[in-house]
Image (cartoon, rainbow, N blue to C red):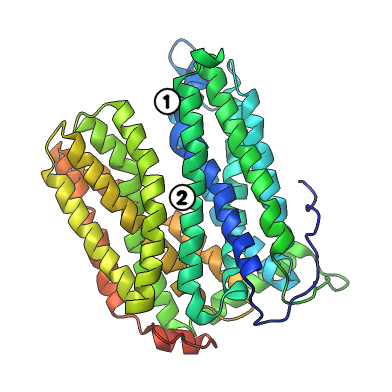
Amino acid sequence: MHSAPPNATNTVAAPGSYSRREQLGWYLYDWANSAYTTTVVTVFLGPYLANITRAAADANGFVFPLGIPIRAESFFPYMISLSVLLQVLFLPILGAVADYSHRKKQLLGIFAYAGAAATMGLFFLQGDLYLLGGLLFLLANVCFGASIVFYNAFLPDIAAPDQRDTVSSRGFAAGYFGGGLLLAANLVLFQRAEAFGLTSGEAVRISMFSAGLWWALWTLAPMGTLRRREPVRQLEPGQHVLTVGFQQLAETFRNARNYPQTLLFLAGYLLYNDGIQTVIGLASVYGAEELKLEQSTLITAILMVQFVAFGGALAFGWLARVLGARRAIMLSLVIWTATVTFAYFMQAGNVTQFFILAAVIAIVLGGSQALSRSLFAQMIPPGKEAEYFSLYEVSERGTSWLGPLFFGLALQFTGSYRIAIVTLIAFFVAGFLILSRVDVRRAIVEAGNTPPARV
């Protein structure tokens, strides 16, 4: 594990002190890590690692990590699933340790730089080194998830209750714009690889390395600006960090029942966010298989989403100030439902309709996620931010199989991608109905926080 970067333990700030400098540094961590999700996870690593794995496969198309026979095409999906499982197991413990020790800034730096280093290590992925690629992705993805827990946990520290919707939205907007900028540059490099004297494989490796480097360099901003609110707590004699983590986590689970409205919100979030993640993950498949669109069209749409989502996140931050975060999220769910319905009626081969679909998705994508984060931050008890945000992260990942399962079953029994995509409406409707029953002001007061002027 890497040591913490410089300035990881700088001076303690007074609780309730907020500064634009600190908020800007916080925004730039989203700018930093989004390059990993866009360039590596969304576009380049999956197809490239599949080719590397096929090169290592036997005559029957199987590889044998740890002696286990796995079809080459299944290796990367299995690595995704394993990384999710590891996050479900470890993130709550790490969150509890962070809250107990008051070291969430140091842990943010450790996991950010470990993830960035693993991402840069993908530059050496070539030939038949599929196992190296799988292990580096595993490390990068787990570290990414851990760093997001500590990053999110800073939101109540850096923004007053009335600012959190705006600040959260700006963070998401920065991430979409930063990730989009690097992805645009890397797509130019990939598409013009020969002009630069590179093979397509070399262009992919350079692109993945650049994402890790981008992540590492821009992480210097939050590490130089974010401040601790409480002195670091040392372990008492006889205590062990893991033992303390489990004890803290057990206490969190026991106390969670005291916040029924927070748990109700979390249940609604898990449902509608699963619908969102499924649409994001399967939109390209739907475009390719049902709408018969070219790969170049799909990649262009992915790039466009990054920049439109930048404006969408900011717009929903403004909307939350007018309507309140809960109502703004509910409006976004109505739009999500209309978008999925529109996808059902789209004409095959109609590029214009697909770009309209992608643009609407982009507008509501950042807003629904940013406001969900800021609303949850209002409803969790002070001093437990990392623990509750770890539950927020792993709960999201733990249910991320539901939407794809609904989609897959509908496709299997009907043979229709259109019917499969429209089944996802159930997730948005269920999330909307649960969210409509959440008493946000009560939830905030129960958690011991001050409600903003408009909820």
- The residue at 32%/56% (across/down) is 363
Identify the residue at horizontal 29%, vertical 31% (top origin). 297
Choose the circle earlier in sequence order: 1 or 2. Answer: 1
The residue to which callout 1 is attached is 73
Across and down, in percent, residue 13 comes to 74, 76
Residue placed furthest toward the right: 237
Task: Give x and y (percent) for residue 375.
Answer: 44, 74
* 142 relative to 247 in the view: left or right: left
* Residue 9 rendering spot, x and y as whole percentages: 80, 64
Which label number is shown at residue 251? none
Residue 121 x, y percent position in the rendering: 66, 31
Q: Is residue 251 left or right of residue 11?
A: left
The residue nearer to you, when weighing 52 against 28, is 28
Number of residue marks = 2
**Quadrant of the image occupied by residue 415:** top left
Alpha-carbon span between mark 1 and mark 2: 29 Å
Name the kind of residue labelled 2 in the image: Tyr
Which residue is found at the position 65% from the left and 67% from the top? 22
Instruction: Give neighbour class at mark 2: few <14, some 14-19, many 20+ (Cα, 10 Å).
Output: many
Circle 2: element type: helix
Instruction: Tell me, yes or no, whether the two marked residues, 1 and 2, touch with CB atoms within 8 Å.
Output: no
Tell me which amino acid carries mark 1.
Glu
Q: Which residue lies under the disc numbered 2? A: 176
Residue located 48% across and 37% down the image: 183
**Res. 329 image quadrant:** bottom left
User: In the rendered image, is residue 82 in sight?
Assistant: no
- Please state if 215 lies on the left or on the right of 407 as rendered: right
Q: Quadrant of the C terminus?
A: bottom left
Q: Is residue 223 above or below residue 185?
A: below
Depth check, front residue: 99 or 176: 176
